[in-house]
Amino acid sequence: MAHISETTGKYSQIIAKAALIASGWEVAETETDESYDFVIRDPLSRAWLTAQCKTVRKRSDREGQLVVYAKNGKGDAYSPDDIDFIVGVLCENGETPRVFMFRNTGLKEYWRTEAGASRDWIEMSIALDRDLLLDGAVSESEEEPKIIEEGV
């Protein structure tokens, strides 16, 4: 049986992909080990970007703040040159997972209160909205998505 951290990590990746796809992003994985987990294509700008998936933890010792440990296998922070975005998955026991996406700025840890996460991170639903996908949400005439425009 896999170690709990491996199982949680794999689960987080599957949920992250589901949220990205449900939000209109294209998701591709590499065949080789890279610093990123996914190559993602923005549904509006059509730009290809890279993303690293991480598990979000709720810290009870920090009044419930959300934390993402964004370190590679060597314990170093991911460089913004290596990955563009971090996709964090909060999976509490028995609750529907929550997925957050934000720009990688090269920190080892990202902390936010619930209010701060709502302000600074994009929360993506895992629920599929077929109308969003059918109505041409990928129209080139629309504005850039908040995540790119604001450089979160």
Image (cartoon, grey):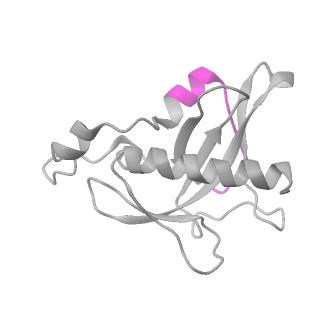
Left or right position of 43 against 135: right
Q: Residue at x 71, y 30 (%)?
A: 92
Of 123 and 152, nearer the camera is 123
Of 65 and 33, nearer the camera is 33
Q: In the rendered structure, does residue 108 fall within the stretch colored magenta?
A: yes
Left or right position of 46 against 20: left
Find residue 59 and report its horizontal and vertical position in percent.
80, 28
Find residue 114 and report its horizontal and vertical position in percent.
61, 23
Image quarter (top left, top right, bottom left or bottom right) of the N terminus: bottom right
Q: Quadrant of residue 129?
A: top left
Find residue 30 and report its horizontal and vertical position in percent.
54, 75
Left or right position of 51 against 133: right
Up/down of 45 relative to 118, above or below? below
Q: Residue furthest front?
A: 1
Find residue 137 and report its horizontal and vertical position in percent.
21, 45
Q: Residue at x 64, y 48 (%)?
A: 12
Q: Residue at x 52, y 34 (%)?
A: 120
Q: Quadrant of residue 47?
A: bottom left
Give the magenta part as a residue range. Answer: 105-118
